[in-house]
Image (cartoon, grey):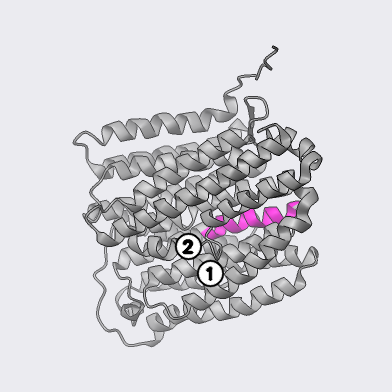
Amino acid sequence: MNIPQIPLDFNALIPEITITAFASIIFLLSLLKINKSLLVWTSVIFLICLIPLIPVFEGKAFGEFFLNDFLAIYLKITVLLGTVISLLLLGSYIKSRLILLKESIALILFASLGMMLLISARELISFFVSLELMSLSLYALVALRKYDKRANEAAIKYFMLGGLSTVIMLFGISLLYGATKSTDFIFIVEAVSKNSELSLAGLSLFIVGFCFKIALIPFHMWSPDVYEGAPTPVTAFISTVPKVAVFGAFGRILIEIFQNYHIQWSSFLIVLAVITIIIGNLLALPQKNIKRMLAYSSIAHAGYIVLGLIAGTQEGFNSVVTYMLVYTLMNIGAFTVVIALNEEDIENYKGLHKFHPVFALSMLIFMFSLTGVPPTAGFIVKFNIFLQAIKAGFTWLVIIAVLFTVVSAYYYLRVVMYMYMKEPIKSPNSFNHRELEIAIMFCALGVLILGILPIYLI
């Protein structure tokens, strides 16, 4: 029997290999009595040095099984930026003695490694393994505070429902393999039309698994409890960075492999997008815990992002990719302010500008951007994704999205109103750490600069 020879070209995989080695070293060092802040800053500096090197390793590895093209590079840089900011938040938490486990640094690095591999995977088995590397690391991160009942409950829910979605997705993969006799994306594209019924059945289960990962309604049950129960730096990380990888991988599969079945899968996603946008925004309205409010708002944003995939064009997918960059900055930025203030009750944000004017101004920028108010970057990317949906003929869907964007302004701008138009109840017990200041400044400037000069967004 002739076994096909796969060229073992590792050049495109060098960033992932480097992160694997570094994360393993950090994990081993965490067993020693080494200052946790030193490990955080070492990891941050390593990732900052790695980011400009990502474009250097453009190309393929293992034949066509691993692709590092322009879109993959853009998504990986977004993932690494989100990871850097999350590590800074983790460092501030460690200083405040709210998280004592040094293994959390290695877990974040391994989760990011899984995301980078997921983005470039062009074969179903490596795709699934990458997704599980990311997911298992996230489950452990949620349970970092093992003596916290809320964290334990959140981790158990996340693990159980995540395991269920994994089983469904794996069944979908098996059906795709049965229909096409291959796990290679290139061969699947060529063979999918030969057994369209079985392929569509596999795709349906595949989509259900993805909908859990991005928390589309009705597959969102885990997210509010997990976001509220997890340590806030972990919540900031989970609510943004994994979605960059999942949307990137999800979009490429739908648009590159199942483009000929756009009508079938877009019909399913349209229903989920409408339900997600409506219910996500309505459930966010009465929330008094800001982490829970941001959890439901992130569900609504997932609905907006899906509009770019529903368009079914490369331009629509590009709008999703740029949206994820801005979403990462503005959502992590909002969580950074929550960490800095050490306050989850929205009522306690009243009169914040009198005690912490910089934090209040930063939160204003993030709330405006999440709403989609110009000249923030949130307006640019939301306008772009709506425009692509209109070009694809989904004007009615955009009208619904715009109406509920107006609804979202109520709960986002309520925070701004409390900070600037209400008398203070008390001064928040804030954490003024260098890591938080750097993270807030980077996110706020990024949202403003990309909004005023959107050269990387259009």
130 vs 433, left or right, is right
At 64% across and 30% down in the image, what residue appears? Answer: 65
Does the image show residue 52?
A: no
* Label 2 neighbour load within 10 Å: few <14, some 14-19, many 20+: many
297 vs 45, left or right, is right
Quarter residue 8 falls in: top right
Which residue is tagged 2? 331
Provide the secondary structure element on which disc 1 rests. Answer: helix
* Label 1 neighbour load within 10 Å: few <14, some 14-19, many 20+: many
Image height of 457 relative to 101, above or below: below
Q: Which x, y percent locates residue 161?
A: 45, 54
Q: Which x, y percent locates residue 296?
A: 48, 69
Q: Quadrant of the C terminus?
A: bottom right
Tally of numbered tags = 2
Taking the magenta stretch, the answer to whether it contains residue 395 is: no
Start-end of magenta stretch: 314-327
Between 16 and 185, the residue placed more toward the observer is 185
The majority secondary structure of the magenta stretch comes to helix
Asked if disc 1 and disc 2 are in contact, CB closer than 8 Å, the reply is: yes
Which residue is tagged 1? 370
Q: Quadrant of the N terminus?
A: top right
Quarter residue 121 falls in: top right
Between 40 and 243, the residue placed more toward the observer is 243
Does the image show residue 191?
A: yes
Ranked by sequence position, the earlier of labels 1 and 2 is 2
Q: Amino acid at mark 1?
A: Leu
Between 374 and 180, the residue placed more toward the observer is 180
Between 124 and 241, the residue placed more toward the observer is 124
Q: Which x, y percent locates residue 230?
A: 34, 58
